[in-house]
């Protein structure tokens, strides 16, 4: 028996099959809730159940605590209805008209800007273009029909090729293929665009971008898009890595500095050979050091879950960042299904 789910404050209502997560059902009916990882890790889809009962599904305990569950919170990418529901969640309307497609693509170019990072340029068929918003991701579909998710690093206006930044993860089947056997002209299939990590253009708030490692990719896309459309809001980009070589497109970030984007690189384990004179420690701590009050800002954070979670927690609890002003995409190094 299907249940009825109503979203507040919009009042939108849709049928929710018992086997569907709340997020799956909402998307099926054309209502886009915030989401990123879709596997209970990042917390982007967290919202409140005002009425009704849910099966919370499988998720990481650190992402949804028992206290949060007692307070009525749930992860809508995991939770399934056990009754009719009324939920409280903001909706994302800007991507509703963008179709999600399954498309083939060809590996056009492979470039390794760091020992453990590969930049892929993917070419679509001549009659195809992917409509997407800067910051979204695609799922590469593997031969066994499993998928691996990667953010698009190019902005929509620069869409001749799709650009992916892939880190070589120990034990990763697909990344091993990318670094050891993939070659130009190989054919891949993908599904996309996906995700709700994109620039909210209707806001006038200054922006802080926080990236760790290859979390740089979607931030790159958003910054290039913002520069292209002429957004004048103050923007400050923090990029965290272990050593200097991990800032694998440092020249690109330096170019943005000349265009008015403030840039702060942060290293946590700089090598003696790096002769690093810049900021050290955790990247989100650098933001805390620089800003005593974030109540009037928006933050876009991307990278390892521990970085994104720490940023969200500390920015909200220590610097008064409103919850609705924090946007994130946590890289879980697994399929987003």
Image (cartoon, rainbow, N blue to C red):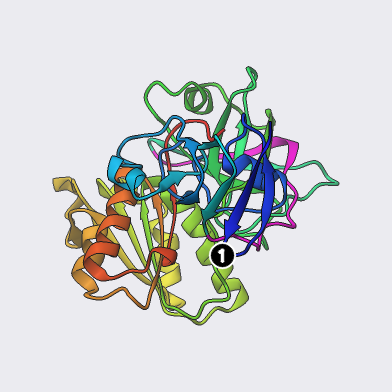
Residue 103, quarter of the rendered image? top right
Residue 40 placement (x, y as % from top left): 44, 37
Residue 47 placement (x, y as % from top left): 46, 52
The outermost residue toward the right is 127
Q: Nearer the viewer, residue 154 or 182?
A: 154
Magenta stretch holds residue 100: yes
Quarter of the image where the N terminus is located: top right
Q: In the picture shown, does residue 329 fall above or below 58?
A: below
Q: Nearer the viewer, residue 251 or 312?
A: 312
The outermost residue toward the top is 144
Neighbor class of circle 1 (other Cα within 10 Å; few <14, some 14-19, many 20+) is few
Residue 250 placement (x, y as % from top left): 38, 57
What stretch of residues is rendered in magenta?
Answer: 90-114
Residue appearing at x 52%, y 57% in the figure: 89
Magenta stretch holds residue 120: no
Q: Which residue is mark 1?
A: 9
């Amino acid at each position: 028996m299907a249940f009825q789910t109503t979203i507040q404050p919009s009042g939108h209502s849709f049928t929710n099959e018992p086997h569907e997560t709340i997020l799956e059902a909402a998307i099926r009916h054309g209502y886009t809730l915030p989401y990123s990882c879709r596997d209970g890790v990042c917390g982007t889809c967290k919202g409140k159940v005002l009425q009704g009962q849910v099966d919370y599904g499988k998720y990481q305990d650190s992402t949804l605590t028992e206290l949060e569950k007692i307070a009525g919170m749930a992860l809508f990418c995991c939770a399934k209805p056990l009754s009719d529901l009324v939920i409280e969640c903001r909706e994302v309307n800007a991507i509703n008209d963008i179709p999600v497609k399954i498309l083939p693509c060809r590996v056009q170019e492979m470039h390794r800007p760091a020992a453990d990072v590969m930049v892929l340029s993917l070419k679509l068929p001549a009659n195809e273009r992917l409509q997407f918003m800067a910051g979204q991701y695609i799922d590469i579909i593997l031969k066994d029909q499993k998928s691996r998710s990667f953010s698009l690093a190019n902005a929509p206006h620069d869409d001749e090729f799709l650009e992916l930044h892939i880190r070589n993860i120990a034990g990763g089947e697909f990344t091993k293929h990318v670094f050891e056997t993939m070659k130009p002209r190989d054919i891949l299939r993908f599904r996309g665009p996906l995700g709700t990590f994109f620039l909210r253009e209707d806001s006038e708030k200054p922006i802080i971008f926080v990236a760790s490692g290859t979390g740089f990719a979607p931030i790159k896309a958003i910054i290039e898009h913002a520069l292209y459309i002429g957004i004048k809001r103050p923007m400050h980009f923090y990029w965290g890595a272990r050593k200097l070589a991990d800032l694998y497109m440092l020249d690109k970030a330096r170019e943005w500095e000349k265009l008015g984007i403030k840039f702060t690189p942060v290293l946590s384990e700089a090598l003696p050979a790096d002769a690093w004179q810049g900021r050290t420690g955790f990247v989100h701590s650098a933001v805390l050091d620089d800003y005593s009050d974030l109540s009037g800002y928006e933050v876009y954070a991307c990278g390892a879950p521990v970085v994104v979670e720490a940023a969200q927690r500390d920015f909200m609890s220590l610097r008064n960042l409103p919850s609705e002003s924090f946007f994130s995409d946590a890289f879980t190094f697994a399929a987003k299904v």
